Image (tube, rainbow, N blue to C red):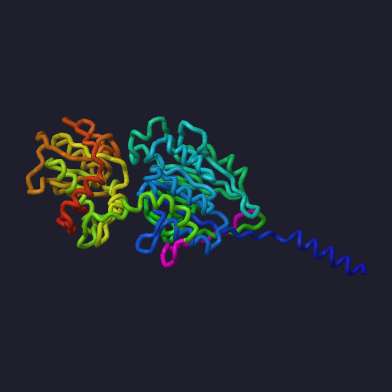
Amino acid sequence: MLSLLVATILLAAIALAAPTQTHIVLMHTNDIHGHVFPEDGAGGLAVISAIAKQHHPDILLDAGDMFTGTLVSDAAYGESVMALMNRMGYRASILGNHEFDYGLNTLRDRVRQARFPVLSANVIVPFTEVRKTCVIRVKGIRLGIVGLTTEETPITTHPKNMKNVQILDVVHTLGQVLPGLQKASDFVIVLGHLAPEEELRIARAFPDIRLIISGHSHTPLQPPLRESNSLIVRTGSFGKFVGRVDLDFEDRTFQKMSTQLIEAKGVPPDPEALRAVEPYRARVDNQMNTILGTATAAFPRLVEDGGAILNLVADAYRSVTGTQIALVNVGGVRTSLPAGPITYGKVFEILPFENTIVTMKINGAQLKRSLGMSLTAVSGLRATFDLRKPKNEKLVSVTLEDGSPIVDATTYTITINDFMQAGGDGYAEFAKGTDVKDTGIRLRDVVSDYIKAKKTVTPVNDGRIQIVN
């Protein structure tokens, strides 16, 4: 009897001394941009919802730019996306630069709608609902999450939507909040909507941070990027992929992690997710599926592939205004155009922002300085860029489309959009233009009318834009 008692006590002591092993499955998304439905059977939050049900994550996080990009999202000012994210059980998200596209009042409504914290430690907005950090307990492990929003936000979002908003340095801000968060957590995650160079700055400045979940660049990382002690993960954009991170702890001390990038393909969309957004889809279904014309072949977005959709958009702008030149910020053209019937909903995805057509006059020197800022789509010009050069120096050469030189002192008529005219993407020279006229015509309406008039459109790959080096 005594030996049995001793054995029992020994077994109990061994059990008490044995370390506790905890395994956590984390899944993450970024840059959904309103894509709730699959396209050609792939991508979108409804498919990701089905994948998440297969993997049974312990926690689901999003790294920003949830809304702007599709008619079903934008017609409801992001309400449809947030309704689905609530249904899916997201535990936290952050402010991306495009969360500001609907204005601050609507942003506040979406943050209030969320049944999870919306974070950003380095964004100061005139309301209190956005939090800097949060601590989420998962299987007894305290996950400390800090949100960070790219410092590029003031130039990648329309300036009119950034009034009363302040964006602070991401590294300095993280240095301020990290000590307190580390004390309250077992493991800290940076949930960032960050440019790649910002990801690296953070990883190098804070070697204690092991996981950075990021977005903004629309570039998936497979394999993940290792920098200093940090693992940086991204899923691309539009719900084409979802990320999985497996975290292992022993007695609440981090041991190891592994990552997986899962393509949102080959899985039927989650019926519950579809039901959550059905009321929003029904409101825009007729408009979304209205056929404008036909594309004889695919129109790629990448300049390396010919940039045909960029050429079509620029030509449409110049066609409606009759100016000598049209310029298009490449970041404003969001996706390619597939071959076949062209719907209004697809044109909306290509040009989702509420920007308008603007005409003005500038001289040749101003034109060259503007093109030096960044890769720019053109109509009426032929331009060569070196994207390795710093801003203001990216233009290698430019002529009119007939080969005539651009003369510094000569005045040219140009068409741009109101985002560029307001200094968006750093195009400061357009504020000095003369005879400025905002037509009030939305960009996608110009392109929709252009396609309807032509009925059939064929990709134009005329080499008007060249990239060297």
Q: Residue at x 45, y 42 (%)?
A: 95
Q: How many marks?
A: 0
Magenta-drawn stretch, dominant element (helix, strand or loop): strand
Q: Does the magenta segment cover residue 371?
A: no
In the displayed structure image, the side of residue 178 where residue 411 appears, left or right: left
Q: Residue at x 13, y 40 (%)?
A: 323
Q: Nearer the viewer, residue 388 or 82?
A: 82
Residue 212 seen from this side: no
Q: Position of residue 279 (x, y in %)?
A: 43, 51
Q: Residue at x 76, y 59 (%)?
A: 16
Q: Position of residue 311 (x, y in %)?
A: 19, 51
Q: Is residue 362 above or below residue 140?
A: above
Q: Position of residue 178 (x, y in %)?
A: 55, 41
Q: Is residue 354 above or below residue 7?
A: above
Q: Nearer the viewer, residue 3 or 424?
A: 424
Image quadrant occupied by the N terminus: bottom right
Q: Does the magenta segment cover residue 254?
A: yes
In the displayed structure image, the side of residue 378 where residue 273 appears, left or right: right
Instruction: Read off the magenta span.
Output: 252-269
Q: Residue at x 9, y 38 (%)?
A: 407
Residue 173 seen from this side: yes
